[in-house]
């Protein structure tokens, strides 16, 4: 099954894995950024006093959490973007934008639904007295949100966000089904060329681990640093 | 028309919960002038906090008006001196009213200094260096200048409340609202907070204070308001209220707390 010769063969295609790594990283990083901003809006909408906004956000979150990621990805790629002609250039000289972009959109829309619930819980965990003190000092709703509530909320939900980021890195592998050249795409290409499967998968496993493990560690570090206001 | 030194005029203020089943405020009218020190007393659930919080609209009244410096802040618009209809921005009025809470509500992720300069810098666009200097002066006044760089969690309850008071003073408010500022404190820390408040009252600050400290109310209050069941039952000087209660309701209340 696994052999030194197999690894040697696979190693000839290591560049595909390097590209896959770059692609997975870009995919996850963009998803994290767009997903978070989107989630923040969703969370605020869901908590809004304006009923239609809150209904929309609730419906959105429930819909995206109740359906499979693969279905969402296919709908975005094959249905929504079927009518849109995206510019076909290559990021870093190899990532096909017209496949990459729908992937980012689908992942962001999906993780936005999950992240918004995390953010909402975080905001609601902050004592209402914080908001009242801030508003009574004359700070606006927005200033209160960004100066007082969010910094404390994000600190509280950092572990949950870290988990979601790690999840995104892993989930992004699904984008291989629409031809985004991430790590699983490298596995499949290498398999086609070498007829080896175990060795490419082992390499992919190692690469994913090297991505997700440090990510959780880095966030744990920041979490410790940000908690200094809690200690005597 | 309001008299010259009338600052806050509350008229027929109501705050209802559960579609009017619970009347937290029931037709309350009261007027507060510049330099007044009004102490609000009354049993638990009588509407003291609700009344105080309606003054700066932390609580939105069901009906009635709160006129502050000639402007009804419960409305969406007001008419300015030139006769133009202007949209009311509640933030502009709130910054003229300082508020001190029972549970301090300092911002735990900011140092004492950052807590104090935040609003002046963000809201009044004050220069941070200037704000810092002002903050240090105020901290000195309450004996906490050496704690400027500490975080709230590192302070005792009494120290936190003193910081909360000077944080509100940073905005140079026209009136200070206190909601049971000493109720969450250990007994030995009540004095230090009350003495800051006494000093503030002596400096001429307009104050509205909800408190259970009857000795303080009698000593510092210029007017005392007794509330029960969402209404103002009696109002008068400390002598009138504490020595000559008119209603049975007040007499029984005083018997319990004194
Ligand atoms: N958000 C709310 N929802 C429902 N009822 C409320 C709410 N806030 C206050 N109330 C009710 O309104 C009434 C007046 O409350 P308020 O807090 O003003 O009393 P208080 O005089 O400050 O009492 P305490 O001395 O216990 O602080 C109480 O019956 C209280 O239960
Ligand atoms: Mg109260």
Image: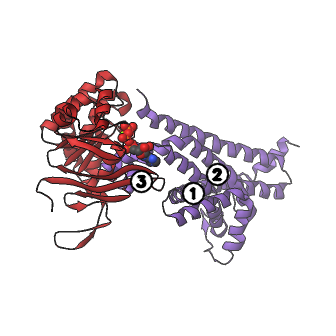
Q: Residue furthest right?
A: A1
Name the chain letter of the residue that bears numbered label 2: A
Secondary structure under badge 2? helix
Front position in the image: A7 or B135 = B135
- CA–CA distance between discs 2 and 3? 47 Å
- CA–CA distance between discs 3 and 1? 41 Å
Q: Say if A102 sits above or below A15 in the image.
A: below
Q: Which residue is mark 3?
A: B16
Q: Quadrant of residue A177?
A: bottom right
- Whether pointer 1 and pointer 2 mark residues with C-beta atoms closer than 8 Å, the reply is yes
Whether residue B141 can be seen here: no
Residue B12 place in picture, x, y as percent: 30, 57
Q: Which residue is mark 2?
A: A168
- CA–CA distance between discs 1 and 2? 10 Å
Secondary structure under badge 3? strand
Q: Which residue is mark 1?
A: A35
Name the chain letter of the residue that bears numbered label 1: A
Q: Colour of chain B?
A: red
Front position in the image: B183 or A102 = B183
Residue A130 place in picture, x, y as percent: 39, 44
Q: Label 3: how many residues lie within 10 Å, few (<14), some (14-19) or many (20+)? A: some
Q: Label 2: how many residues lie within 10 Å, few (<14), some (14-19) or many (20+)? A: many
């Amino acid at each position: 099954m696994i052999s030194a010769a197999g690894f040697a063969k696979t190693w000839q295609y290591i560049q595909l894995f390097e590209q896959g790594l770059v692609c997975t990283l870009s995919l996850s990083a963009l998803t994290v950024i767009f997903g978070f901003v989107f989630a923040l809006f969703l969370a605020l909408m869901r908590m809004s006093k304006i009923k239609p906004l809150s209904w929309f956000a609730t419906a959105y979150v429930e819909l995206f959490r109740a359906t499979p990621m693969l279905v969402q990805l296919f709908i975005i790629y094959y249905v929504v973007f079927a009518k849109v002609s995206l510019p076909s250039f290559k990021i870093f000289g190899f990532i096909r934008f017209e496949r990459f972009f729908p992937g980012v959109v689908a992942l962001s829309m999906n993780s936005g639904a999950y992240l918004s619930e995390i953010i909402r819980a975080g905001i609601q965990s902050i004592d209402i007295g914080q908001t009242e003190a801030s508003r009574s000092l004359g700070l606006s709703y927005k200033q209160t949100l960004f100066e007082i509530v969010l910094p404390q909320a994000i600190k509280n939900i950092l572990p949950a966000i870290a988990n979601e980021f790690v999840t995104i890195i892993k989930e992004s592998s699904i984008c291989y089904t629409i031809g985004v050249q991430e790590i699983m795409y490298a596995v499949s290409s290498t398999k086609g060329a070498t007829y080896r499967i175990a060795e490419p998968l082992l390499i992919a496993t190692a690469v994913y681990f090297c991505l997700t493990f440090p990510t959780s560690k880095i966030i744990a570090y920041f979490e410790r640093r940000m908690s200094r206001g809690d200690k005597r | 028309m309001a008299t010259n030194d009338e600052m806050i005029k509350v008229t027929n203020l109501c705050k209802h919960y559960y579609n009017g089943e619970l009347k937290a405020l029931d037709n309350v009218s009261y007027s507060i002038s510049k330099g007044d020190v009004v102490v609000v007393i009354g049993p638990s659930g009588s509407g003291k906090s609700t009344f105080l919080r309606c003054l700066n609209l932390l609580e939105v009244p069901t009906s009635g008006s709160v006129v502050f410096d000639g402007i009804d802040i419960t409305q969406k618009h007001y008419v300015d001196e030139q006769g133009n209809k202007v949209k009311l921005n509640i933030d502009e009025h709130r910054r003229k009213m300082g508020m001190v809470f029972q549970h301090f509500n300092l911002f735990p992720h900011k140092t004492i200094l950052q807590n104090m300069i935040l609003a002046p810098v963000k809201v009044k666009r004050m220069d941070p260096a200037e704000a810092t200097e002002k903050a240090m002066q105020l901290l000195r006044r309450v004996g906490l200048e050496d704690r400027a760089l500490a975080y709230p969690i590192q302070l005792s309850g009494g120290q936190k409340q003193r910081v909360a008071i000077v944080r509100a003073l940073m905005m140079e408010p026209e009136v200070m609202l206190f909601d049971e500022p000493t109720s969450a404190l250990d007994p030995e820390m009540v004095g230090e907070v009350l003495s800051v408040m006494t000093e503030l009252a002596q400096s001429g600050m307009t104050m509205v204070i909800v408190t259970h400290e009857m000795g303080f109310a009698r000593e510092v209050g210029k007017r005392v308001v007794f509330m029960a069941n969402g209404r103002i039952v009696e109002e008068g000087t400390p002598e009138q209220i504490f020595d000559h209660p008119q209603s049975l309701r007040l007499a029984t209340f005083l018997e319990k707390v004194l």
